[in-house]
Amino acid sequence: MSLQAVADVRPPIMPAAALSPAIELENVTRRFLTPNGKSMTALRDFTMTVDRGEFACVVGPTGCGKSTTLNLVTGLAKPSAGEVRVMGGPVEGIHKDVGFVFQADALFPWRSVLDNVAAGPLYRGLPRKAAYEKARDWIARVGLARFENHYPHQLSGGMRKRVALAQTFINEPKILLMDEPFSALDVQTRTNMQDELLDLWSGSGASVVFVTHDLEEAVALADKVYVLTAGPATVKSVYHIDLPRPRVMEEIRYDPAFVEKCRIIWNDLREEVQIGQQRTLETGH
C-alpha cells in the first residue's frame, strides 16, 4: 500500500476550530422590571462568541450591562429574546463547568483557607481525604501554603483573592467568568494578581470572560476585547489583541504595540463613556 493510500484511510483529525465555541450569545435581548414597575432593557441584539481556551475581556460605560452578560452565561438570568449557549448547548440553570470570581470576596468567613478551598470538591462528591489533598496543592500553587489554617479576616486583600482563585480553579472549570475581581486592590497587588491569573489560566485550557472598567487591564490580559455601547448594551466593536504570550504585566504596559492598542480602543470606548455620562446628567441615574 502506498503512503498516499495509508494517509487516505487514517481518521481525520478534528481541528480545535471545529469544536463549538465555549460561549455564544446570539442576538440576545434582556429586559427586566424596575422597582417602580417599568420595563428596562439591559442588553439589545447582543452577540458575542468566546472560543475554547480564549481569554475575552468586556469593557463599556458604567451600568451598560456588562455584569448582566455574565449572569446570562451562568444561567442566573434568562434572555428575553435570542439564544445563549455554553459548550454547544442551551443554558439550563447553572452549568457545572462554569466558575465565577466576584468583585467582593466570596469566602466563608468562619472557615479556614484550607476549608474554603476544599469546599468545592467536597460539594461535588470528592472523598474528604482527596479533597483536602487537592486543596493543599492549589493553596501551594497560589503561594499560600503557610496560611492554610488562617481565616479570611487574617489575610490581606490580595491573599483573599489568591484564595478565591484557588477556590475556583480547583474545580477545573471549562469556563471562568470574572466580574471586576481585582478592582478593589491597590495597584501593586492588582498587577501581581493579574500575573497570577494568567499563570493559572495558561495551564487550565479554560475560556474566560473578564469584565473590567480598566482598559489597560483588558488589553494586557485578553485575546479579544469587546467594547459595549452605553445601555441598553450591544457590541459596538471587537478587537483582537495579538500581543505575544506569555505576558508579564509590569513589562507589557511599556510595549509600543500595547500603548497603540489602548489608544485605538479608548478612542472607540470614550464615545460611549461620554454618552453614558450625559445620560446620567440628564436623568439623574
Image: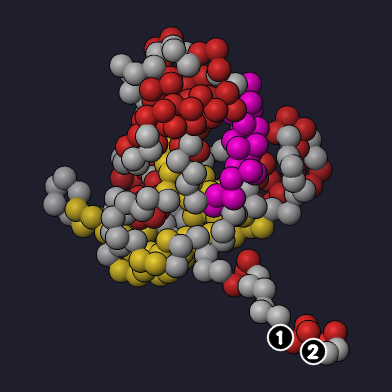
Tell me which residue sits at (46%, 62%) in the image: 87
Looking at the image, which residue is at 79% across and 89% down? 5
Furthest residue toward left? 37
> Dividing the image into 4 quarters, which one contains the N terminus?
bottom right
* Proximity of marks 2 and 1: CB atoms separated by less than 8 Å: yes
Q: Which residues are magenta?
A: 186-207
- Packing grade of label 1 (10 A; few <14, some 14-19, many >=20) is few
In the image, residue 226 sits, relative to residue 160, either above or below, namely below
Q: Which residue is mark 2?
A: 5
Picture quarter containing residue 203? top right
Question: Which residue appears farthest toward the front when viewing the image?
Answer: 1
Residue type, mark 2 in image? Ala
Q: Is residue 92 left or right of residue 240?
A: left
Please tell me how many numbered marks the rendered image carries. 2
x and y percentages locating residue 83 in the rendered image: 36, 68
Is 91 on the left or on the right of 271, as rendered? left
Instruction: Place residue 7 in its image quadrant.
Output: bottom right
Horizontal and vertical percent for residue 271?
54, 52
Which kind of residue does numbered mark 1 sit on? Val
Residue at left offset 37%, top offset 50%:
96
Q: Position of residue 261 (x, y in %)?
A: 71, 49
The answer to if 122 sits in the magenta stretch is no
Task: Check the image and report above or below for 51 versus 271.
Answer: below
Residue at 67% x, 78% y: name it: 12
Which residue lies under the disc numbered 1? 9
152 or 123, which lies in front? 123
Q: Give SS at disc 1.
A: helix
* Dot 2 alpha-carbon crowd within 10 angstroms: few under 14, some 14 to 19, many 20 or more: few
